[in-house]
Amino acid sequence: MKEKLRKYGAFFLALVIIAGVYMLFASRKSGMFIDEIYTYGLSNSHYAPFLTDITEDGSLVDKTLSRQDLLDYVYVNSGEGFDFGSVYYNQVNDVHPPLYYWLFNIVSSFTPNVFSKWTGLILDFIIFMLSLLVLYKLVLKLFGSHDNALAAVILYGLSNLGLSCALMIRMYVLLTLLTLTLALLIACLMEKPRAYLYPLVFLNIFAGLMTQYYFVFYAFFLCLAYFIYALVKKEYKPAIIFAVSALLGVSALLLAFPACLTHLFADKLVSGGNAVDNLRDLGQYKQRLLIFYHEVQHGLKAAVCITLVLIAGLILSHKKLGAAFKEKKLSFDSLVIIVPAFITLILVAIISPVPEQRYVYNIGPIFIIAVSFLIYLLEESWGRINREFWVKKGILLLTMLFALEFARYIPPRYMYPEYNDYNELISQRSDEPCLFITDNYFSTITEALQQLLYFDNFYVSNDPYSQGIDRYIESFGDADECVVYIDVNDFWSSGYISEEILTKLIDSTDFNSYETLYKNGLTETYLLKK
């Protein structure tokens, strides 16, 4: 018991601290990115993947939408729980596979008629903690050091990259877990091929592809690296069985979710067609690579700083390192797991729909394992030292404090503190009429959904001179003010010019002036006044 406490006590203490930091940031999360709202809608809306699907004719224009319409889209209604067929249908019409959305629907089904950030955050928290456990086991398997494994958990669990992934209510946190479990299975196969591992490889690859298609990149290069490794080791039979297991995992995706082929060849921003277009655009390579390099470096700031210290230590101890290499004390098997992540980073940076950090969230822990490899080299080159136990524990404590400080000054993404101001501005005017000017783009309404929920209803139009607008405003009696959302993005949506729309609304209604409330992403929000 004492031995287990000595080995694992610090690990569980680190998990408690990381969990506390996660919950602190989770409680401060004030809003959601548009894709997070899609997570709720695609998981919980009954055979209606997008807001345009809640109407019979597929159009929101010239219609009054109620608060209940929006809530029906984002939460599970009573009697519609565990509706896996609906989730599958919604994802066929979206651009992603359904596994994470099934899990989200299950969690949401336990709290019907509830729309809360905690539905997603609790699910993500559980998956995040499991990822840290797998990361610990993986580093321990590769390098045989509990202290090294604990350092990896601290550096990833408190990193901007790790916390941002877990705080974004999206499939990337599950993708990260499945990436780590596949790496762990490969590590186990490198140690000793065992028959029970091959079905697990099959299931892991199938589950990863059913979570997010970008799983294929790291999985492909990792599987290829292990296949070559096995051939070099003359483990021909395990290599063939492994290859068959991996290919069966891909085949299972085609059988379970044939819509993946439609998604692959679609001509959309998030599709295989877009990826090919980006691959052909040689001119953007440098810019994209620099953006992703900065993103990862920023997201793993503490790990980068420690890497520089470790490299300096290895340079200073190059003679000991060289001696350890000659004596064959060092194992480089971990490179089978590490190198594919760097290849994946380059490829994803080039082909991703937009240059955003989230597309490489799943390989974030693998970069931490690269840091663990440097720690392993330093440990092996230095060998035993005086008061080794206390020195290592002191270094771990400093690492924890260092990572906590970075978490404090570089908070995770997807917090949206400005939403507190948006909500306050809108809640004060929730009794007023609300117009939404868009040319039937569900994306803009989805993004603004959290503020629109303050109104009993709002009217959608693409024509400031619409008679429907007049009738809607008249239904509020002699309203002195009217909130107006205008769809201004010319890439994702309508691209209206606010001043032109507002001028026309003043011309066609009894309002005679306007002021800006706030501007957020796809829309700008104004207040019409008499």
Image (cartoon, rainbow, N blue to C red):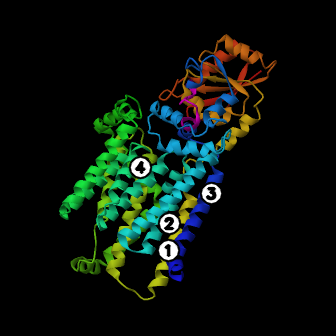
Q: Is residue 109 left or right of residue 204?
A: right
Disc on res. 154 = 2
User: Do we see residue 411 in this rendering?
Assistant: no
Q: Is residue 287 above or below residue 516?
A: below
- CA gap, disc 4 and disc 3: 23 Å
- CA gap, disc 2 and disc 4: 19 Å
- Residue type at mark 2 is Ile
Disc on res. 396 = 1
In which quadrant of the rendered image does the N terminus lie? bottom right
* Spot occupied by residue 84 in the image (x, y as percentages of width and height): 52, 38
Q: How many marks?
A: 4
Q: Is residue 205 left or right of residue 327?
A: right
Badge 4 vs badge 1, beta-carbon distance below 8 Å? no
- Residue type at mark 4 is Val
Please provide the residue range marked out in magenta.
41-52
Q: Nearer the viewer, residue 232 or 465?
A: 232
Sequence-wise, the earlier of marks 1 and 3 is 3
Residue at numbered disc 3: 23
Mark 3 residue crowding within 10 angstroms, few (<14) / some (14–19) / many (20+): some
- CA gap, disc 2 and disc 3: 16 Å
Residue at numbered disc 4: 360
